[in-house]
Amino acid sequence: MEWNNVMRTRKSCREYIDQQITTAQLKALLEAGCAAPVARGKFEQLQLTVVQDKELLDMIDAAAKQSYGDDSFSCTRGAPTVIIVSVQEDQGQIAPNMIASAGCVVQNMHLAATDLGLGSVYLGSIQAVNNSFEVLYKLKLKDGFWPVAALAVGNAKEPAREREIPVDKIFTNIIA
């Protein structure tokens, strides 16, 4: 797909069919994530965790429901794959530029998913799992790493369609 078509077709998908993505699709998504810009080139301060285990996906949803106090909330949106981006803490804190880097990784994968004909959605709510020792343990994170962003991905129930993007969608202040 051409860049402009990808950009106009990308949307947040919140409903998926019960079919796992292929190994080739996963590899392409991970490659896109690894091609993202990362603050100061500190790729070693990021970790990707691919979750395709249904039981763990359900645990992630349960942790988010508890954290948000909302029994109807679905963090994973029922996607068969969730790719979590975790960031290494430094002296007990996570640097804002590394959170931004995690967002860049997710956005690259989000656009790649669109190019592959997959549905996907950015999951900022994945941070809710930081309140669940059991989920954190099962994610097998390296010491000092914390989930900050994720991408739910799968085959969408309804395909995304290209749309026009108005240039005034976001208020823009041009200073010349």
Image (cartoon, grey):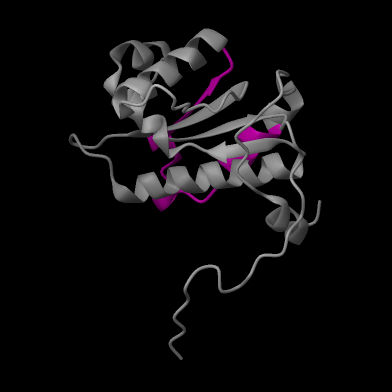
Snapshot quadrant of residue 30: top right
Q: In the image shown, does 169 or 4 lie closer to the viewer? A: 169
In the image, the segment drawn in magenta is 28-53
Q: In the image shown, does 36 or 168 lie closer to the viewer? A: 168
Kindly give the residue lying farthest to the right in the view shown: 1
Kindly give the residue lying farthest to the left in the view shown: 91
Q: In the image shown, does 144 or 153 lie closer to the viewer? A: 153
Please report the residue visible at 48 percent of the width from the left and 36 percent of the height from the top: 123
Give the image location of residue 63, x and y in percent: 36, 19
Please report the residue visible at 28 percent of the width from the left and 45 percent of the height from the top: 95
Q: Residue 127: say if magenta.
A: no
Give the image location of residue 160, x and y in percent: 74, 45
Q: Is residue 142 visible?
A: no
Please report the residue visible at 39 percent of the width from the left and 21 percent of the height from the top: 71
Q: In the image shown, does 65 or 40 lie closer to the viewer? A: 65
Q: How many marks?
A: 0
Snapshot quadrant of residue 147: top left
**Quick check: 114 left or right of 39?**
right
- Please say if 35 is above or below 8: above
Snapshot quadrant of residue 62: top left
**Quick check: 155 left or right of 134?**
right
Q: Is residue 152 visible?
A: yes
Kindly give the residue lying farthest to the bottom in the view shown: 176
- Please say if 135 is above or below 106: above
- Please say if 38 is above or below 49: below
Give the image location of residue 174, x and y in percent: 47, 84
Q: Residue 38: say if magenta.
A: yes
Give the image location of residue 117, x and y in percent: 77, 39
